[in-house]
């Protein structure tokens, strides 16, 4: 279903940055007719929700680019990003005008669970890779990788809303990237362990 693809794309985007897809959904729903949020979710497009979301987004953009602080931020976001993914998935799939289907609207728990799972998987990949990237680049990689993640979250959010059929391709590409990054980090750790020993191969940051 088109609505499910939109929800999955937005949830994956929330796994990278919880507030980018939230803000996009809120602004698109408030100022256009592309998304009409159903009863129970209208608060997302309210001025106060957009204001709070903007502050949280700015905070996330700054903290996620500071080595060591980004790891702490990721730990905190372990609870926030999956929850945001579930919220956004449920809100957008419940807006059944996207595909005239009432099944997701009649079973809202499905959207919440799928959103949490998708967002949680993406967040887990991000959280596992970031400390190794920081250690391997002496912190220089943090702002670069964070900026790339923000761009991916923005792009995936826009694709999910305006070209949802491309979400499948985008999710495959994101999954490939996360697996590639995980394998690269694993190889890097093995090389460090061989050269320095297991106690010094993976410094905490």
Image (cartoon, rainbow, N blue to C red):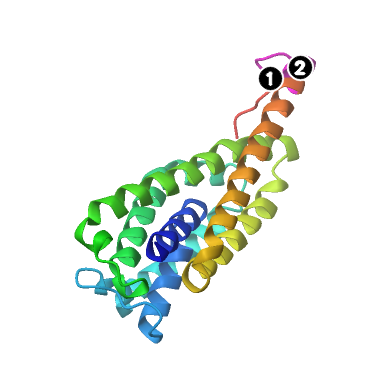
Q: Which residue is mark 1?
A: 200
Residue at the spot 39% in from the left edge and 44% down from the top edge = 117
- Give x and y (percent) for residue 131: 61, 37
**Quarter holding residue 29:** bottom left
C-alpha span from label 1 to label 2: 6 Å
| For residue 28, side relative to residue 105 (left or right) | right
- Give x and y (percent) for residue 4: 39, 59
The answer to whether residue 25 of the structure is visible from this angle is yes
| For residue 37, side relative to residue 162 (left or right) | left
- Magenta segment: does it hold 84? no
Q: Residues within 10 Å of mark 1 (few under 14, many from 20)?
A: few
| For residue 47, side relative to residue 136 (left or right) | left
Screen quadrant of the N terminus: bottom left
**Quarter holding residue 27:** bottom left
Residue at the spot 67% in from the left edge and 32% down from the top edge = 183
| Numbered tag placed on residue 196 in the rendering | 2
| Numbered tag placed on residue 156 in the rendering | none
- Give x and y (percent) for residue 180: 68, 39
Task: Please tell me which residue lies in front, 63 or 50.
Answer: 50
Q: Confirm or deny contact between disc 1 and disc 2 (CB under 8 A).
A: yes
- Give x and y (percent) for residue 178: 61, 42
Span shown in magenta: 192-200
**Residue most extreme to the right:** 195
In this rendering, the answer to whether 70 lies above or below 49 is above
Screen quadrant of the C terminus: top right
- Magenta segment: does it hold 199? yes
Residue at the spot 48% in from the left edge and 47% down from the top edge = 73
Q: Secondary structure at mark 1?
A: loop
Q: Secondary structure at mark 2?
A: helix
The answer to whether residue 56 of the structure is visible from this angle is no
């Amino acid at each position: 279903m088109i609505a499910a693809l939109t929800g999955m794309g937005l949830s994956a985007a929330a796994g990278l940055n919880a507030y980018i897809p939230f803000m996009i959904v809120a602004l698109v729903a408030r100022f256009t007719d592309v998304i009409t949020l159903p009863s129970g979710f209208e608060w997302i497009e309210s001025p106060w929700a957009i204001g709070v979301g903007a502050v949280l987004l700015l905070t996330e953009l700054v903290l996620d680019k500071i080595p060591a602080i980004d790891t702490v931020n990721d730990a905190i976001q372990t609870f926030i990003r999956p929850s945001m993914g579930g919220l956004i998935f449920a809100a957008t799939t419940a807006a059944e005008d996207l595909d005239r289907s009432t099944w997701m609207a009649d079973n809202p728990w499905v959207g919440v669970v799928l959103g949490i799972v998708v967002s949680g998987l993406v967040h887990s990949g991000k959280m596992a890779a970031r400390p190794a990237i920081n250690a391997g680049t002496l912190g220089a990689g943090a702002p670069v990788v964070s900026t790339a993640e923000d761009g991916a979250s923005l792009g995936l959010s826009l694709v999910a809303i305006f070209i949802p059929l491309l979400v499948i391709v985008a999710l495959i590409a994101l999954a490939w990237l996360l697996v590639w990054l995980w394998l690269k980090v694993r190889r890097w750790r093995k090389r460090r362990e061989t050269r320095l020993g297991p106690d010094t191969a993976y410094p905490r940051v």
